Amino acid sequence: MKNLKILYKELDFDSGDLLTAADNPSLCPKQSDWLEKGEWLAAAKRAGAEKVFFVENNPVVVFA
C-alpha cells in the first residue's frame, strides 16, 4: 500500500479525481461523487481494488 501512495503522488493522481473504492455512500467524500460513480466504486471494492481514478465520471485507472 505504501508503494501505491508513492505512485499517486509521483504521477499526480492524488490531485485529480482519485477516489477510494467503497461499497458504502458514507465513505465517499461528496454525495455527488457517490451518485455519479458509486456503482464503479462498489464494483472496484468487490474486486479488491484500493482506489479508482476517474476522468469525466469514467474509471480510467484502477489501483489494487
Image: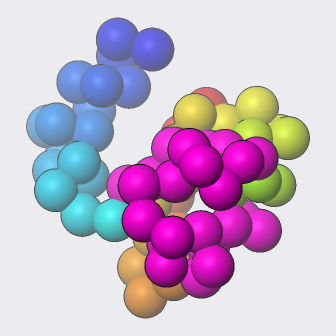
The coloring applied to the image is rainbow
In percent of width and height, residue 29 lies at 41, 55
Query: As rendered, which of 37 and 44 lies closer to the eye?
Result: 37
Residue 36 lies in quadrant: bottom right
Residue at (23% x, 24% y) in the render: 6
Residue at (76% x, 47% y) in the render: 23
In percent of width and height, residue 64 lies at 61, 32
The extreme top residue here reads: 2
Query: As rendered, which of 19 and 60 lies closer to the eye?
Result: 19
Residue at (34% x, 65% y) in the render: 17
Q: Left or right: where does residue 14 sit relative to residue 29?
A: left
Q: Dividing the image into 4 quarters, which one contains the N terminus?
A: top left
Residue 56 lies in quadrant: bottom left
Tell me if residue 40 comes above or below residue 27 in the rendering.
Answer: below
Tell me if residue 11 comes above or below residue 53 in the rendering.
Answer: above
Does the magenta-highlighted stretch encompass residue 28? Answer: yes
Tell me if residue 61 comes above or below residue 2 in the rendering.
Answer: below
User: Does the rendering let one see residue 16?
Assistant: yes
Q: Which residues are magenta?
A: 18-40
Tell me if residue 17 comes above or below residue 19 in the rendering.
Answer: below
In percent of width and height, residue 10 lies at 14, 37
User: Does the rendering let one see residue 44?
Assistant: no
Q: Left or right: where does residue 53 sit relative to residue 22?
A: left
Does the magenta-highlighted stretch encompass residue 63? Answer: no
